[in-house]
Amino acid sequence: TKNIKWWQKAVVYQVYPRSFQDANGDGIGDLKGIEQRLDYIEKLGADVIWLNPIYASPDKDNGYDISDYEDINAKFGNMADFDRLLQKAHDKNIKILMDLVVNHTSDQHQWFIESRTSKTNDKRDFYIWRDPVDGHEPNNWGSFFSGSAWKFDETSGQYYLHLFVEGQPDLNWVNPTVRQSVFDMMNFWVDKGIDGFRMDVISLISKPDGLPDGEVPEGGEYGNADKAVANGPHVHDYLKEMREQVLNRADMMTVGEASGVDIDNAIQYAAKDASELNMVFQFEHMGLDNNPNPALGKWYDKKVSLIDLKQNLSKWQNKLADKAWNSLYWDNHDQPRAVSRYGDDRPEYRVVSAKMAATLLHFMQGTPYIYQGEEIGMTNAYNLKRADFDDIEIKNAFKYLIDKDHLTDEETMLRYVHAKGRDNARTPMQWDDSQNAGFTTGEPWLKLNDNFQTINAQAALADPQSIFYYYQKLIRLRHELPIITTGIYQLLDPDDDQVYAYRRVADNEQLLVINNFTDQVLTRHYHVDQNADMLISNYEDDQGSTLRPYESKVYRF
Ligand code: TEU
Ligand code: CA
């Protein structure tokens, strides 16, 4: 319990503002809507809200393309609405984590508008401009969202780099004026009293010298920019500089979204000495159910192997212990729904398996993140068809993988999108069974999941056995029992491909966490002390060595 930081005991609730609550009937969630729902988040017991980007943006990538960092997207409200939300959250002892998107800006940001006017403009060097090579792109990098990562600009005859969509030009962090401008902007928010930052693709800000080609996956057209760019030569210097200029000015929480980061990198980013960040979102467990054909990347519909999942999560638990700090997540606005991916969203198993997945994650060491709707077991949105999708990643994937590269067919692709697409997480929050699920009185910006009449917050709040109250209890247990924060993690039976069991061990106490990952009745024998208490379970009684479908139980002794 000594030296435990507040964010090590905290549970974060992620709010995707566009889809949380619409207060003015325009079909888009907004800041006033979040304010109206603070009681709900307080009831759940979360300590921190992470807000996805709410800044001015042309919304080419739902707010991850920012045109003014110090202004609020008019769809969401204005700065007074933000200030009031922050105040109201603080009144409830809920902290607010802001999304920081500084690998790139929007092409509508003033910096880029000036930068693209000419080669000699004093903002030219704010971005990454290169001459064509033999009339082509400067290197082979592909964008994360399909196609080339370079866009030719007629005005000056040069290309600019965009690792994401064309409207997201990458900032040139080598330029000290860029770094200073970013730090000044961050301090604007720190001065408002926000409680920390979630840093978008922060592992990509330092590009490798000479921008070398990336490896081309078999059957693919472009080089892997993620691998080529992640953990570049100066990223740790930049973060140390950010720590000195911004982060040390208050007791803040920081989490770096870190694609392409392995254990050794993570230990550097999130080292205990707090010279850089508090923790990172690592992606390894998110890639375990990728398509075996690397050219298709994440687009696939087979479930993860439990053995692989155990191996991976346990590696992170063990290797970061005492050196750095883990973040724990099953889903977010970029990932499908946890119950559909790691549990079983068939009606008879949805509730029990959502609780199982929650138990598995919430007894690990690290800071857990709950994505809006996860706490009521919202599922993937199988009712959306190609024309219904809004997400640029999904749209481009259809366009390239089917129409252009012929790597798959439309029907298969739709299956993959139903399993993995980002819009699964982005359909509006399901509050009740009224029209549009209580999300909006207008026309929702993205089609609702058609199961909202059975799956909604109102129903969950009325049912003492609901997933909501199970999450509430998980959060309370984490606040009350230091062993969940500090205990040593020990995986049991790494070769069991049906049950994920582990122990947390402290001086005079231990927890035994048992999770049946299947829809089968199984028999397993674990050593359970005579005096053990059942801390939490998703069934009403304990049948000892018999494990019912998706049964989860945690003993304490
Ligand atoms: O995501 C970064 C990232 O790595 C994504 O490409 C992720 O792999 C992908 O969405 C999974 O399908 C962040 C944000 O979370 C995402 O919403 C943004 O689109 C992206 O950065 C660009 O800012
Ligand atoms: Ca609105």
Image (cartoon, rainbow, N blue to C red):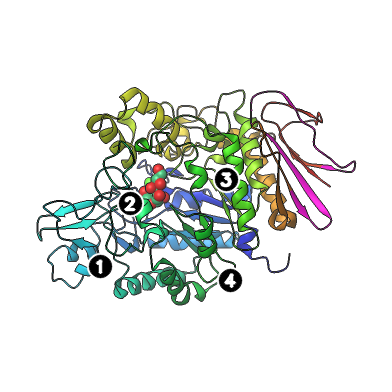
Quote the CA–CA distance across marks 4 and 3: 25 Å
**As rendered, which of 351 and 191 lies closer to the eye?**
351
Quote the CA–CA distance across marks 2 and 3: 24 Å
**As rendered, which of 49 and 513 lies closer to the eye?**
513
Query: Which stretch appears magenta?
Result: 504-533
Q: Secondary structure at mark 3?
A: helix
Q: Earlier in the sequence, mark 4 or mark 3?
A: 4
Work out which quarter of the rendered image holds the N terminus and state it: bottom right
**Point 73% across, 55% down: residue:** 487
* Badge 2 vs badge 3, beta-carbon distance below 8 Å: no
Q: Is residue 75 above or below residue 544?
A: below
* Residue under pointer 4: 273
Q: Earlier in the sequence, mark 4 or mark 1?
A: 1
Estimate the x, y position of residue 17 in percent, counting from the top left: 43, 49
Is 26 displayed left or right of 8 in the figure? Answer: left
Estimate the x, y position of residue 121 in percent, counting from the top left: 15, 71
Is 486 displayed left or right of 113 in the figure? Answer: right
* Residue under pointer 2: 225
